[in-house]
Every structure is written in structure tokens, then in C-alpha cells.
Amino acid sequence: MLDQVAELIREVAHTVVLPRFQRLSADEVHQKSPGDLVTIADQESERALTRGLTALLPGSVVVGEEAVAADASVRDRLGGSGSVWVVDPVDGTNNFAAGRTPFCVMVALVRDGETTASWILDVVADHLTVAELGAGVYRDGERIKARADDPGAAGLHGVIAGKYFPDELRTEVLTNAAGLGGYTGGRHCAGYEYPAVAVDEQQFAMFWRILPWDHVPGALIVREAGGVVRYLDGAEHRPTGDQRGLLVAANEDIWHTVHRTLLPSGPPV
């Protein structure tokens, strides 16, 4: 099934998403909430993926970003038993709508509350990252592993996606980030940030708003590469979790180093 899902994602990306890149008309982009866009490509991609995924696995259901935007109760499917597909039809929609990269198509399969497989396709770069629980993670067919050592805070570079942080926490984290080797605000695309940790382009990423379609696919990829994905209080990320604040790191030691550096007084209450 790994290959079948990968083929479906590529087909949808190349026939639905990519043809609309830098070709959207004004009436094909709408605002769901302030700063949160949806395009016709998001909607058509999710419909195509939903049809294809449920056909591949009869009896399964889908939790897609746009379906939840239309009916919030759809998200409750993640708390049930059975097989649930988590779909982000265009991750990085704001980038896509602005005619810039990166943007991705992301899918994860959750069985009885546990993520068992995930796929992230960086559409323009054409990198496909696939993970299976207990079987590792592969990028473009080659197995990848996250960094295993900790060079210390001054040797670490990563992302602090501070847009949704509470003001006080943002101030604390960004002030303390001076103790790290460097950071950026990210590429506004979780589908880019997670694989970047897995291949050591960066060693950590910190987020505040944790929506399942943004984080469930990437969390399995980082963990299968040897990394760590935990809430700021140290609890493991779960597909059904509704906490805010997440720290992704290439390994256990780096997670603790970044956490101590950015939050020396402990996690926010």
C-alpha cells in the first residue's frame, strides 16, 4: 500500500495542484480566517485524495483540513477506532497562493489512534518522504537517519515558528534563542520542516498551533529517522492530542538542549 498511496499523491499533485501553481485567479483564493487561505487546488486535491484513499482501504475514513474547516466534527474521527487517513491537500497554502515554494501534499494513516504510515511530497522539488511504523523512513527511495550527536546549543540551527505563540512566550523564546547557533521563522510549510530535521538540514523545529494534518505525517517521519517529537511539557505527540506547543528535534539530547536553552524556567503553564 505504501507505493499505491505514493502513486496517488503524485498523481493528484501533478494533475490537480501543480497546474494551478502561479495560475490562480482572484476568485480561486479565499480566506477561511484572518491570514489562513484556501484555494481551489486545496479543495480539489482533498476531494481527489479522499476518493483515492478510501478506495485503497475500504472502510477507512478521512480527516482532511478542508473537510474539518467545513464541519469541525470531522476531526472527531481521529478519536475513534479503525483506519483514519489524515490529509493536508496543500500544506503551505499561503506560499502556494503567493506563487512561491515550498508547498507539499501530506498524508498519514492512523490505525486505532497510532500513526502507522506517512507520506510527504514536496511538489516542486519532487522529494517524496515515506515512513512506516517500525520500518524506517525513506526519501526518494533512500533510507535516511537523523543526526545522532548533540553539538551543543551553539552548534544547533532550526526553526521557531513563532507566529501563533502567546506574546509573553514568544518574547521569552526569541530572547533565549540567542544561545543557539541560529534560527529562522521557518518556511511556512510543516511538510518542509519535518523532513529537514530528518536529513539534518536543521536540528530542531518549534511550533505552537498543532493541527493534525500539519503535524501527524511529519511526526512519524522524524521519529522513524531517530528523532523526537514532544509537547513542551515533555509528553509525546499524539495524533489525537489537542495541546499547544511542540518541539521537534533530531534526537533526545538535542531536544533537551533546545528545550533548556529556550525555556530555562520550564514549559509554559
Image (cartoon, helix red, strand yellow):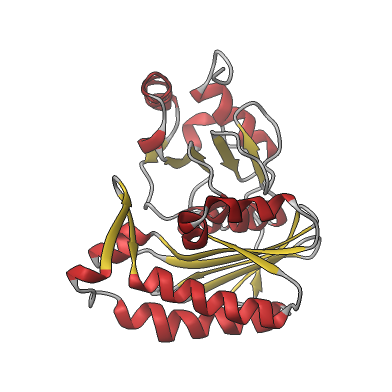
**In the visual, does 257 lie left or right of 59?**
left
**In the visual, does 29 lie left or right of 163?**
left
Let me know if residue 100 appears in the view: no
| Image height of 239 relative to 43, above or below | above
Question: In which quadrant will I find the N terminus?
Answer: bottom right
| Image height of 106 relative to 216, above or below | below
| Image height of 57 relative to 265, above or below | below
Quadrant of the rendered image containing residue 251: top right
Give the residue at x 37% y 63%.
102
| Image height of 179 relative to 73, above or below | above
Residue 152 drawn at (x, y percent): 56, 31
Residue 116 drawn at (x, y percent): 75, 62
How many numbered marks appear?
0
Q: Nearer the viewer, residue 121 or 149?
A: 121
Give the residue at x 59% y 56%.
74
Residue 18 drawn at (x, y percent): 36, 79
Residue 88 drawn at (x, y percent): 51, 63
Residue occupying the far left of the picture = 26
Question: In which quadrant will I find the C terminus?
Answer: top right
**In the visual, does 100 lie left or right of 47?**
left
Q: Nearer the viewer, residue 28 or 260?
A: 28
Let me know if residue 97 appears in the view: yes
Give the residue at x 58% y 42%.
248
